[in-house]
């Protein structure tokens, strides 16, 4: 299994916000921390906002913050929101009937078991589990509290 770049950066956005809980995070700051374009991150934010993982605050002092607790957002939930499909083979796709073995295929069963294991593993990890216990995350993301000005969270 391979997650898309969109899912990878969706998780990174959530990690950034989780590591920065007392402040609003600006998309420009997040983009700079991960060395990607703001436009790319803006595209990724939309499904995160729609799913309630992130809230946006408009205005001069606006930004983004987690829409729910970091320990209530699993990696599986994020992947399910950001991945277009988990079809590992053509027979996983809706309406696929080209294969005469579709109803009794051992390959299909093996791939389904692999996908279930993959998603089950993602379900055991939360955004909080990715940032908690790592004292260097804030430093590595440029969130050293001495250098980042406080912004009011409304």
Image (cartoon, rainbow, N blue to C red):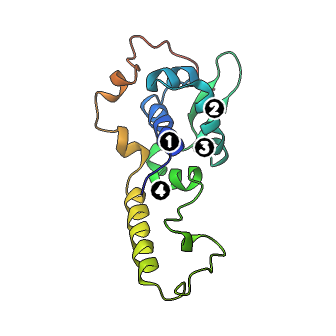
| Residue 140 lies in quadrant | top left
Place of residue 78 in the rendered image (x, y in percent of width and height, measured from the top left): 52, 50
Q: Visible in this render: residue 153?
A: no
Residue 48: which numbered mark, if any? 3
How many other residues sit within 10 Å of disc 4, few (<14), some (14-19) or many (≥20)? some
Residue closer to the observer: 1 or 70: 1
How many other residues sit within 10 Å of disc 1, few (<14), some (14-19) or many (≥20)? few
Place of residue 61 in the rendered image (x, y in percent of width and height, measured from the top left): 64, 17
**Of pointers 1 and 3, the one earlier in the residue sequence:** 1
Mark 4 and 1 residues: CB-CB less than 8 Å, in contact? no
Query: Closer to the camera: disc 2 or disc 1?
Result: 1
Q: Quadrant of the N terminus?
A: bottom left
Callout 3 secondary element: helix
**Of pointers 4 and 2, the one earlier in the residue sequence:** 2
Q: What residue is disc 1 on?
A: 5
Q: What residue is disc 4 on?
A: 76
Q: Residue at x 39, y 76 (%)?
A: 110
């Amino acid at each position: 299994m391979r997650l898309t770049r969109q899912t990878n950066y969706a998780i990174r956005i959530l990690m950034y916000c989780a590591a920065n809980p007392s402040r609003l995070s600006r998309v420009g700051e997040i983009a700079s921390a991960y060395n990607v374009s703001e436009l790319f991150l803006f595209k990724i934010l939309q499904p995160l906002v729609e799913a309630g993982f992130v809230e946006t605050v408009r205005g001069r002092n606006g930004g983004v913050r987690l829409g729910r607790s970091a320990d209530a957002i699993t990696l599986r939930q994020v992947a399910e929101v950001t991945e277009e499909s988990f079809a590992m083979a053509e027979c996983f796709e809706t309406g696929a009937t080209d294969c005469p073995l579709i109803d009794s295929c051992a390959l299909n069963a093996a791939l389904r078991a692999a996908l279930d294991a993959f998603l089950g593993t993602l379900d055991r990890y939360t955004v909080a589990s990715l940032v908690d216990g790592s004292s260097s995350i804030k430093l590595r993301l440029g969130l050293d509290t001495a250098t980042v000005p406080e912004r009011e969270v409304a």
